[in-house]
Amino acid sequence: MSYYERHVFFCLNQRTNGEASCADHDAQAGFDHCKSRVKQLGLAGKGGVRVNKAGCLDRCAGGPVAVVYPEAVWYSWVDQSDIDEIVESHLRDGQVVQRLVLPDSVGR
């Protein structure tokens, strides 16, 4: 058994060379909201969910992005209601939110 059931990484990278980056899409707000909702729902901690910041995950064209392990599901979102859906459907109930899954063809 893994220490955490699920581990979520949010790209918070900010590029200074003019290239697109997740920070351009307020990824920090998505991270903050996800971390808060996970705690509110009692999902945080050992045997539950860990929400972490990450540097560039190299999928900038789909930003903002986050990835959930162990399923390796990549998400992009628009607003807090999308984050709520990811938390409640995937992190709590184990159901991938298909409409928010980042297509494999999206890279940097």
Image: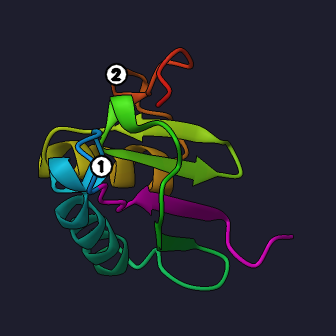
Q: What element carries label 1?
A: helix
Give the answer, above or below, for where 58 lies relative to 47: above
Q: Earlier in the sequence, mark 1 or mark 2?
A: 1
What's the magenta region? 1-15
Name of the residue lying farthest toward the top:
105
Expressed as whole percent of the image width and height from the top left, the position of residue 53 reads 44, 71
Residue placed most toward the observer, 37 or 101: 101
Closer to us: 6 or 52: 52
**Circle 1 sits on which residue?**
22
Residue farthest front in this picture: 17
Q: Is residue 32 magenta?
A: no
Please state which amino acid type lies under the numbered disc 2. Arg
The number of discs equals: 2
Three-letter code for the amino acid on which mark 1 is drawn: Cys
Q: Residue 100: image x %, image y %?
A: 35, 29
- Location of mark 2 (residue): 99
* Farthest bottom residue in view: 45
- Say which element carries label 2: helix
Pointer 1 local density, CA inside 10 Å: few below 14, some 14–19, many at least 20: many
Picture residue at 55% right of the left edge, 85% below the top: 45
Colour convention of the picture: rainbow
